[in-house]
Image (cartoon, rainbow, N blue to C red):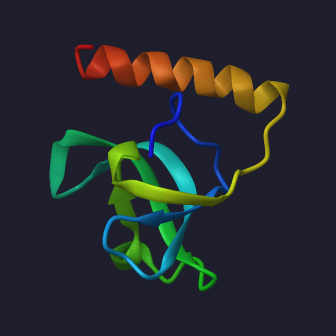
Amino acid sequence: MNNNGLLPIGSVVLLNESRKKVMIVGVAQRSASSPDTIWDYSGVLFPEGYLGADNMILFNNEQITQLFVLGYQNAEQLAFKAKADAALEKLRGK
């Protein structure tokens, strides 16, 4: 899926070769097992929600094949998005 930067928290998406939807619950995430990798998102299965830290899904924009619901957006979220998009670009050397 091609979009302009990060999706807002609460967005519900489908990932490559998946049958279960995922709800975005965090952006610009790192995992303890690979701290040098920065993922665009952390998510939880939808509609189940948070089932524990071991069930968090880390993924990037390129893995999203379908957007079902766009999360809530307002001026505060849009300002955060601009800062987060810029920070991710800088961290990735783009």
Residue 13 position, x and y percent, is 54, 62
In the rendered image of this protein, does residue 7 appear above or below residue 22? above
In the rendered image of this protein, does residue 51 appear above or below residue 64? below
- Count of marks, rendered view: 0
Foreground: 52 or 10?
A: 10
Q: Residue at left 45%, top 79%?
A: 52
Residue 11 quadrant: bottom right
Q: Residue at left 52%, top 59%?
A: 66
The answer to whether residue 93 is visible is yes
Foreground: 36 or 70?
A: 70
Locate the C terminus and report the quarter of the image it occupies.
top left
In the rendered image of this protein, does residue 57 appear above or below residue 82? below
Foreground: 51 or 89?
A: 89
Q: Residue at left 28%, top 20%?
A: 91
Q: Residue at left 51%, top 25%?
A: 84
The answer to whether residue 17 is left or right of residue 1 is left
The answer to whether residue 18 is left or right of residue 37 is right
The answer to whether residue 29 is visible is no
In the rendered image of this protein, does residue 79 appear above or below residue 19? above
Residue 88 position, x and y percent, is 38, 25
